[in-house]
Image (cartoon, rainbow, N blue to C red):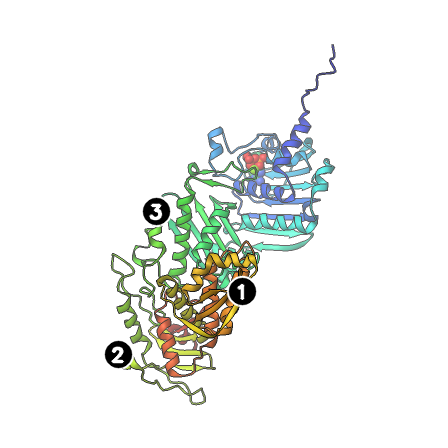
Amino acid sequence: MQDSSNIIHTLSSETINQIAAGEVVQRPSSVVKELMENAIDAGADKIDVVIQDAGRTLVQVVDNGKGMSAQDSVKAFERHATSKINGASDLYALTTMGFRGEALASIAAVSRVELKTRREADELGSRVEINGGELASQEFISCASGTQILVKDLFYNIPVRRKFLKKNETELRNILNVFQQIALVYPSIRFTLSHNGTSLFSLEKENYRQRISSVCGSKTGKELLPINVDTVLARISGFVSTPESAVKKQPSQYFFVNGRYIQHPYFAKAVQLGYEKILPADVKPQFFIYFDVDPDKIDVNIHPTKTEVKFEDEQALFSIIVAAVKEALASSNAMPSLLFDQEDRIEIPVTPADFSTLKTPPVTHNSNYNPFSSTRPAHASGSSFAAPHKQSVEGWESLYDSVKCPPANDDPAPFEAVPDVAADLKPQFKGFVYGGKYIVCSSDAGVLFVNSYRASVRVAYDRFMAMLSSGSSSGQMLMFPEILELTPLENSVFAENRASFEAVGYSFEPFGPTAYQVVSVPSMVADSDAVAIIKENVKDSESKDVALELKERLVRSLAIKSAGRTSVESAEAAGRLTDELNRSSMPAFTPDGLPVFFTLSIDDIKKHIG
Ligand code: ADP
Ligand code: MG
């Protein structure tokens, strides 16, 4: 007897398939991803992707891979049909692209699919048509070896899903993202992508660096520093951008694990941290980082589309990434080698505890890198920060090397070095100022061009930083104290950071509930600027997401203001400035990451004039 109060019924297999399809096939880009991954798994070295109407009407993927037998070409569309796994344990091994055996079934459930495939050894290939999951036809045909799949009219049988698709530009952007994510992992595979008859990509077989150039632009490709670390947790390779090619908007930031693109905000932070102090917080480095990990050490099943992966020891990897990025920056000329002893560079720390010992060099004087010398000091096997003073004096000898080729007569006159107090200790500085702005001098590495303004910013920044950490402020009393008036909110930020202001030379007297008399200011900056700087910094802190500490920003703005007042016209001034720069912990860049100098090496010169 029929009991109308029974409400449970079994869903039809069509509905089940459509629900399952919803997980795999969310939008046209999911189809592109699944089909490209299948082609890669089939061993193809040429894959062509053809799109119409952002994938709504057609996604076609043609490969030259191993193809399928006639029987498999039908079986492939059955749910849980896969040639790639045998049991549940395989699910955890991320060695092939697909492992669920449901992509083709899901795609076929929500579109009209036409498949042509032939194995090389077979004389005839197979052509299969499936509409909304129902086999419509199968026949033998002659076709190229490999596989060709056309997915037409996506979601034709599920109007609701069709409605959820975004504008064509958005769907196409998603497709491009997926295509790029895959192309960046397989530089040895030729890929093409076309949309509505227009070719968007045509990628030849190339190496990683070239592929990054072809996909992300030649500018990005040119400015890459290699990363290479082998640890017990993972092998990490790839590239990070030079500080100069970091960008404010839409950086190319890619992580790949065992050949798949993943998102990993935590590791992205680690990379950013590697650029600490050489990039402002709002400028993002670009990176292409490839992990090779034992599949046991990752959990790929935390996200349905598998773009998130959980690593076994993420904290340790975090530290390894920071260290690897710093090393890449250091071992190129992009950044002075401060934190790493070149000789033991293989020993990247594997635990955060180890890493902490590398984090802050105990001295502010640079020991490992001398911009004015090509020869890095030989490293004692113990501390890499030993004997900074001696080495910086050695640096001088090269800086004061005479300019081998004096400037021509119509150049600005080379200034005569004016002996200073220490003149008897040092050879004469034989550089000159060019264009009122650049200090030109020679070094072992070649001819140096120093941007004097940027050098002043770097030097002033270091000085303020040293004051902050030593507490040895040098303030200048104001003849007419200025009044600093703050809003209650500003006042709370100010109160919290008052010690930092005082540490660089400010002092204050109370002047009402939220106002102060500024009695003294840092002696390196002008009075009027000084009060403005407090205001600026306190104000900026109101916006919640300021990543830089107030202290850091304060010192940056003080450095900029103070550098604005330094003029480098005389030999003395140039000498003093380069002297201080030479002792900086990071002479190559301003605190905002702008290059301070560049070297025209003897090789560069030879290239031009023999
Ligand atoms: P999975 O990739 O997870 O195995 P799919 O539904 O994507 O599941 O594919 C099912 C099977 O169809 C694959 O295991 C493979 O044997 C076969 N197949 C799919 N695409 C191709 C292709 N382009 N070339 C050769 N075989 C393919
Ligand atoms: Mg697959």
Would you identify the image quadrant in which residue 34 lies? Answer: top right
Q: For the point 46% across and 65% down, which residue is it?
A: 509
Could you give the CA–CA distance between mark 3 and mark 1, rounded to whole angstroms? 37 Å
Q: Tell which tag, 1 or 2, sits nearer the viewer.
A: 1
Residue 14 in the image, given as x and y percentages of width and height: 68, 28
Q: Nearer the viewer, residue 425 or 10?
A: 425
Residue that lies at the very extreme toward the bottom in this rendered image: 409
Q: Is residue 481 visible?
A: yes
**First in residue order: circle 2 vs circle 3:** 3
**Between 246 and 20, the one nearer to me in the picture:** 246
Q: Which residue is mark 2?
A: 425
The correct choice, above or below, for 5 with respect to 475 in the image is above
- Depth check, mark 3 against mark 1: the one in front is 1
Q: Residues within 10 Å of mark 3 (few under 14, many from 20)?
A: few
Q: Residue at x 68, y 36 (%)?
A: 110
Q: Position of residue 525 (x, y in %)?
A: 46, 73
- Residue denoted by label 1: 536
Judging by the rendered image, the residue that carries numbered circle 3 is 353
Image location of residue 589, percent across then percent down: 43, 66
Q: Is residue 207 visible?
A: no
What mark, if any, has residue 332 been given in the picture? none
Residue count near mark 1 (Cα–Cα under 10 Å), binned few <14, some 14–19, many ≥20 = few
Q: Earlier in the sequence, mark 1 or mark 2?
A: 2
**Proximity of marks 3 and 1: CB atoms separated by less than 8 Å:** no
438 relative position to 192: left or right: left
Q: Position of residue 356 (x, y in %)?
A: 35, 51
Q: Residue at the location (50% across, 46% down)?
A: 264
| Dot 1 amino acid type | Glu
Amino acid type indicated by mark 3: Ala
Left or right? Give the position of 124 relative to 237.
right
Q: In 3D space, how far apart are the residues under numbered discs 2 and 3 (Cα atoms)? A: 43 Å
Task: Identify the secondary structure beneath mark 2.
Answer: loop
